[in-house]
Image: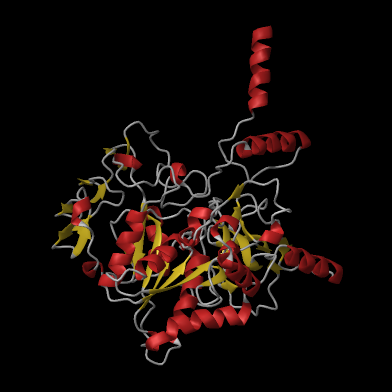
């Protein structure tokens, strides 16, 4: 993890993780912004600028300010007014008061507005008369708020892909078997409610949980000692010092013993700001008098396997488990699929992999050489002296490359490396064409556009810029003007 003030240097637009006073950093509705700069060949190119920490797309949060820009008082006032308009309509305490009034209502009068995502009291019925309402909301329904609320599905900022019961059960059973009694759930609402429900069962050991999430809607269901409105990209507690002290008290309870942090960030989020925030969380835990200053907060970071290099750069003592995490509301990340369709989501942890038992019923086995549990297809390579598979398929060893590679790759003597069989010799087959990162392909790039028509708009913008004589270097290198191609075809037909 970079120390305070150290800059993360890769190619492209990069974030500068510097420790500055919260008063000096401009704020957007998502809290303190982050400082960015364009980096090329390890050197800064262009002016530094501030942008939203949580949203990677300007259409989700339009905040932008040059770092050396002087902002007028009128603009600062307008910005503060706008940020205030984006805050939740009620405080956490007011939401809790409404929740108690809602519970006191008879079952027939408990209604939930699916359009406004709000629990309704009798006084609210008229205002929501034309909306889609859910009636007879039971106490059991209120214990599973993730099933009442529509998941937020913006992959770049606040994506809510909710764990399946299978994944929740494995995570909780593992936490209990490791001896932890408190779980700090950062961005994992489904696990938080699963822990609360299972803790009521007499057969399960009691485990406490505190949820930190950017989705303020959970304020309707959980008290201030159960939920904190939190942005994990800038370590910002929207509830201020009061909310932060609740989190710190939770971490330091019992002298800091028996607590683990479990986080499931949006896969399109930048790794470095996340790691920076998690380090700060670990420092909060270290403030307990009974914790070793050299120790780190036990952590499960759930993320796709192709981010392994970046995560290990931030946390060298982490290791990746083979367990495949799956989600209820994700079309691809499902358990039971084979080949390339398997879920790429894994668990990164600073806990010894040898102590984390993966279920044999799902085909996991213990490798006595690697001293960890691996998937059934992850064969131990006697040359690499490791179980080398990352994606769940059986990898093969390539003697010329002196490493194991994916089963679909073959060694190309022209390129002197392994690549797909029908590749273009001499081209750079490694890395991502879209963002330039070397740890994943374009098809699995978390930065790729997922909303229909957005790339089309980019192409139209490219055409407009070309006609105006301006450059559009932000667009993909391989872009071609379709309108121009159509005009050329019409010319050929005419001749």
**Residue 307 or 260: which is nearer the viewer?**
260
In this view, 483 is above or below 453: above
Q: How many marks?
A: 0
Toward which corner of the image does residue 207 lie, by quadrant? Answer: bottom left
Say whether residue 110 is visible. Answer: yes
Q: Position of residue 461 (x, y in %)?
A: 70, 38
Q: Residue at x 21, y 55 (%)?
A: 387
**Residue 108 or 334: which is nearer the viewer?**
108
Q: Position of residue 427 (x, y in %)?
A: 42, 38
Left or right of residue 69: residue 483: left
Please state, as top left, top right, bottom left or bottom right, where the N terminus lies in the image. bottom left
Left or right of residue 247: residue 86: right
Q: Position of residue 165 (x, y in %)?
A: 36, 55
In this view, the residue farthest toward the right is 74
Q: Residue at x 62, y 78 (%)?
A: 240
In this view, the residue farthest toward the top is 495
In this view, 177 is above or below 14: below
**Residue 178 or 391: which is nearer the viewer?**
178
Q: Residue at x 49, y 63 (%)?
A: 187
Q: Where is residue 10 in the image (x, y as percent from the top left)?
A: 51, 60
In this view, 124 is above or below 95: above
């Amino acid at each position: 993890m970079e120390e305070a003030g150290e800059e993360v240097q890769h190619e492209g637009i990069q974030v500068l993780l510097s420790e500055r006073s919260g008063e000096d950093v401009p704020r957007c509705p998502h809290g303190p912004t982050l400082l960015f700069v364009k980096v090329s060949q390890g050197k800064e190119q262009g002016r530094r600028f501030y942008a939203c920490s949580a949203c990677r797309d300007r259409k989700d949060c339009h905040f932008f300010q040059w770092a050396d820009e002087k902002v007028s008082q009128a603009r600062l006032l307008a910005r503060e007014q706008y940020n205030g308009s984006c805050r939740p309509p009620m405080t956490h305490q007011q939401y809790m008061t409404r929740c108690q009034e809602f519970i006191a209502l008879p079952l027939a009068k408990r209604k939930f507005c699916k359009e406004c995502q709000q629990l309704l009291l009798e006084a609210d019925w008229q205002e929501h008369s034309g909306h889609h309402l859910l009636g007879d909301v039971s106490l059991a329904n209120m214990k599973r708020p993730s099933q009442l609320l529509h998941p937020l599905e913006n992959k770049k900022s606040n994506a809510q892909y909710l764990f399946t019961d299978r994944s929740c059960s494995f995570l909780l059973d593992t936490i209990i078997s490791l001896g932890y009694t408190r779980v700090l759930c950062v961005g994992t609402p489904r696990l938080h409610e699963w822990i609360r429900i299972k803790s009521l069962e007499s057969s399960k050991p009691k485990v406490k949980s505190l949820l930190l999430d950017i989705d303020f809607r959970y304020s309707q269901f959980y008290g201030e000692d159960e939920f904190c409105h939190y942005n994990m990209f800038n370590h910002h507690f929207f509830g201020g010092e009061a909310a932060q002290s609740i989190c710190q008290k939770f971490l330091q309870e019992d002298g800091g013993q028996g607590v683990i942090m479990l986080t499931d960030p949006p896969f399109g989020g930048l790794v470095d700001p996340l790691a920076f925030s998690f380090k700060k969380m670990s420092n909060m835990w270290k403030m307990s008098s009974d914790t070793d200053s050299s120790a780190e907060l036990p952590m499960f970071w759930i993320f796709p396997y192709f981010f392994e290099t970046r995560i290990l750069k931030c946390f060298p003592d982490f290791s990746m488990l083979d367990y495949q995490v799956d989600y209820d509301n994700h079309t691809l990340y499902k358990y039971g699929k084979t080949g390339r369709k398997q879920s790429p989501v894994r668990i990164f942890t600073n806990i010894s992999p040898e102590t984390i038992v993966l279920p044999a019923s799902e085909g996991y086995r213990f490798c006595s050489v690697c001293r960890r549990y691996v998937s059934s297809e992850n064969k131990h390579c006697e040359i690499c002296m490791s179980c080398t598979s990352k994606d769940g398929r059986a990898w093969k060893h390539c003697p010329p490359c002196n490493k194991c590679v994916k089963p679909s790759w073959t060694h190309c003597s022209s390129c002197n490396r392994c690549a797909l069989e029908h590749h273009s010799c001499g081209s750079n087959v490694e890395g991502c064409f879209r963002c330039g990162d070397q740890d994943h392909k374009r098809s699995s790039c978390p930065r790729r556009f997922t909303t229909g028509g957005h790339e089309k708009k980019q192409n139209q913008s490219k055409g407009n810029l070309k006609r105006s004589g301006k450059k559009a270097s932000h667009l993909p290198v391989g872009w071609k003007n379709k309108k121009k191609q159509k005009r050329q075809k019409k010319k050929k037909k005419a001749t």
